Amino acid sequence: MISLYRPGATPLHRLPAGPKLALLSIAGVALTVTTHIGLLAVAAAAAAGLLASARPPGDLVRGQAMGLLWITLVVLGLAALAGSWRDGVIFVFRVVALVSLATAVTVTTRTADIQDLLERGLSRLGPGGERLAERLGLAIALVIRFVPELLAHAAALDEARKARGLKASAPRLLIPLLVRTLRTADAVAEALDARGYPGTGGSAVAQPSKTSGDTAA
Amino acid sequence: MTTRDLVLVALFTALVVALGAVPGIPVAALPVPIVLQNLGIILAGAVLGAWRGAAVAALLVVLVAIGLPVLSGGRGGLGVLGGPTGGFILGWIPAAFVTGLVAERIAPVGSPLGRTFLGVGLGGLLGGIVIDYAAGIAWLLAMAPNEAGLPLGERLAKTTLGMAVFIPGDLVKIALAGVITHALGKAYPIARR
């Protein structure tokens, strides 16, 4: 799984993650309360320019636009029914500005930097927050580690299905994939407990797994 | 939270991410193949239970926010959360929670097929459709301008009508979630939490 971050040296890349996210939040609120078409048009053009300067991957921009197509049509339809072309124009400018700005922040900020910010924020909430931050770090690492594995397993299951001449169906794919996911989770949990991985905690009260009677903690 | 809870949540989240990348599956009753990602969210609640199911959805939101392309079609990043469809993604957190809660109340793990189907079905309807659509539509209406001064009730009704094209697909997914949860309860039963 490759991050949406794109390395570069634009001013947006150099701005630290904290201020960037703060500015984005302020811009988000401002764009949502403004109904001035001229201002919104300028904002949309500026945000799109900013995003273009960060050189986002083409796939990302296309995917983002496709994901918004239907909802935009619904809002435009609503505006047309109400006989208010202004509503439609405001919505389109607002969405272009907001989504471009937010995507520009994602493309110019390292995944690790946003994660750090999040974990530091959680740590400030006291010992409970600190534990949560540690667990979040571990959970994110596990997801990144296991997505390719589950995708490979899904592909293998699909091959096996084709070899048997069966039609694609959700249960046929999902049941074995879920069993693999749960079984792997039990094995990984046991391995983490056995090694006393810091941050997981509660190993002494871990539920005995189905596959073997005792944990090695 | 035990180590096992944490790892189950992480790996289930990995599964939901993987489901966003596998091609859609054709269903006889529907004109377009169904995307499996939000079926994964319903399953998270139905299989893992309310708390861990909600944790799966929350972890997914964090992954989107830190800029990983974890949503179907390779989408991700702050643009998705901040955009007009962001409410549907954030709504997955209470959706998975409610699905798990209702499924557990009506059909504890190991219930017969009919009962599991009913429990996961009602939970999925309430969580995956009522709550997720409410969150998504509320978010959308907060972002859509209303210079024409339409009354809220009318905007709500018309927007819901516009989003209703997705409901048949969601109903199929909820039915599938019931069948899959039952089969999994026999193949690899785990207690809901």
Image: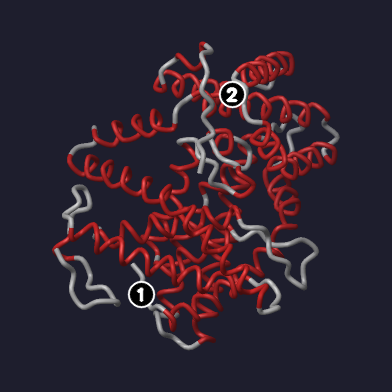
**Residue A131: quarter of image:** top left
Residue at the limit of the structure toward the top, as seen here: A11
Q: Do dots 2 and 1 share one subunit?
A: no
Along the viewing direction, whichever of B163 and A183 lies nearer the viewer: A183
| Left or right position of B181 against A166 | left
Does B19 sit above or below residue A15? below
Give the labeled residue for mark 2. A101
Q: Which percent across, then down, holds residue A110?
A: 44, 28
Which numbered disc covers residue B190? 1
Residue located at (66% from left, 70% from top): B172
Residue drawn where x is 70% and y is 52% of the image = B160
Q: Helix or strand or loop: what does disc 2 sit on?
A: helix
Mark toward the viewer: 2 or 1: 1
Chain to which mark 1 belongs: B
Q: Vertical placement of A63 versus A104: above or below?
A: below
Rate crowding at label 2 as few (under 14), some (14 to 19) or many (20 or more) other CA atoms within 10 Å: many
Q: Nearer the viewer, residue A119 or A187?
A: A187
Estimate the x, y position of residue B147 in percent, counting from the top left.
74, 29
Query: Quadrant where the C terminus of chain A lies?
Result: bottom left
Q: Residue at x 44, y 72 (%)?
A: A179
Q: Chain of mark 2?
A: A
Q: Tell which of A9 and B77 is nearer to you.
A: A9
Q: Amino acid at mark 2?
A: Leu
Give A36 or B34, whichever is nearer the viewer.
B34
Q: CA distance from mark 2 to mark 1?
A: 43 Å
Q: How many labels were placed on the picture?
A: 2
